[in-house]
Amino acid sequence: MSNMHRIHWFDEQVRCGRFPNSSWLAREFEISRRQAQRDIEYMAISLRAPLVYIAKYRGYCYEDQTYRLPHLYMTEEEQRVLKYLAHRYRHYNYDQSDAVKRVAHLLERFTLEEQQTGSSQLPVFRADPQQLQFFEILSHAIAESRKVHIHYRDHVGERQFTWCPLKMLSQFNADYVVGYEKDPLQQTAIRLEGMIHVQITNETFQCQTDGLLGAWEEALPVRKPFVAEIRLKEVQQTELWQGYRIREKQDQVYWIEFYDTAAFLQHLFISEWEELLSPTWLRRKLQQSAEGIIDRLAVQRKTNVN
């Protein structure tokens, strides 16, 4: 659900004199208190809403009753693209960096991310579909302080580990996520391009935000996500299915957005679901992958028998 939908609801509660607060907003839309407070800060900072907290009523009212929310018409997909671009531009430290960071600040006003501001020809960034997908999953995990399970490959080899992500960052034309495995004092940055698979977990962690870095690079993410129609076993209580955005739902059937086909196929192999209804090409790829695994197992079985 769009954050503007939540903001319009909050605005209505304020106008009705109900003195809403972040707890109300979080409970109404089943989001975290942290996300709800960001929505309220976005209203105050970016939308110039004259919000005043009244301690007596433990909620907000408008100091200026004539205030009206600006008319903003933007889809969630457009907001995600702007968020990605703002992140890239904000961490651009090469030619014309001052101008670029001013553009980043402008974009951030539409993405709930007020960062530092940063001036003519602008760099063009390319959005790798897999990294864009990982960016979405990791951004959600960071917002909810949830751990992720990462399958990772670098010069040392392949390994799998559980990670506490803290912040996205770009340096030297590479994308990173800052975080730690067990010790919050041993924060490091790992490259997104080294990730083979990322899965969000239900396990949360105590957020540690001291001494963080910053990051991102590559081209315009003007590409629409693929959509898979899937019948799930359980009703989803959030707007995400284990990190993948739910576009819409009807009963147990969900329309799930994804950017990287290989990563989503791997996700389907390890997730609980009942039926993949569409698209046909994705069902075919999944069947081919499954048949390939069965064939390899058959060969291995014959080898063991002989």
Image (cartoon, helix red, strand yellow):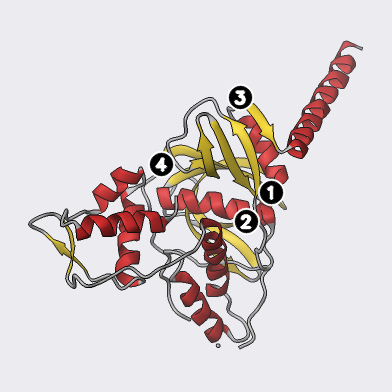
- Nearer mark to the viewer, of 4 and 3: 3
Query: Label 3 to label 1, Cα distance in Å?
Result: 21 Å
The residue drawn where x is 46% and y is 70% is 108
- Among numbered discs 2 and 4, the one appearing first in the sequence: 2
Q: Is the C-beta separation of discs 3 and 2 under 8 Å? A: no
| Residue 204, numbered label | 4
83 or 75, nearer to the observer: 75
Task: Return the mark for residue 260.
Answer: 1
- Looking at the image, do the residues carrying marks 4 and 3 touch, with CB atoms under 8 Å apart? no
Amino acid type, residue under disc 1 in the picture? Asp
Residue 122's place in the image compared with 194, above or below, is below
Q: Which residue is mark 2?
A: 132
Determine the CA span between mark 3 and mark 2. 27 Å
Q: Nearer the viewer, residue 148 or 18?
A: 18
Choose mark 3 or mark 1, whichever is in front.
Answer: 3
Cα separation, mark 1 vs mark 4, equals 26 Å
Q: Amino acid at mark 4?
A: Thr
Q: Is residue 195 left or right of residue 52?
A: right
Query: Which comes sooner in the sequence, label 1 or label 4?
Result: 4
Mark 3 residue type: Glu
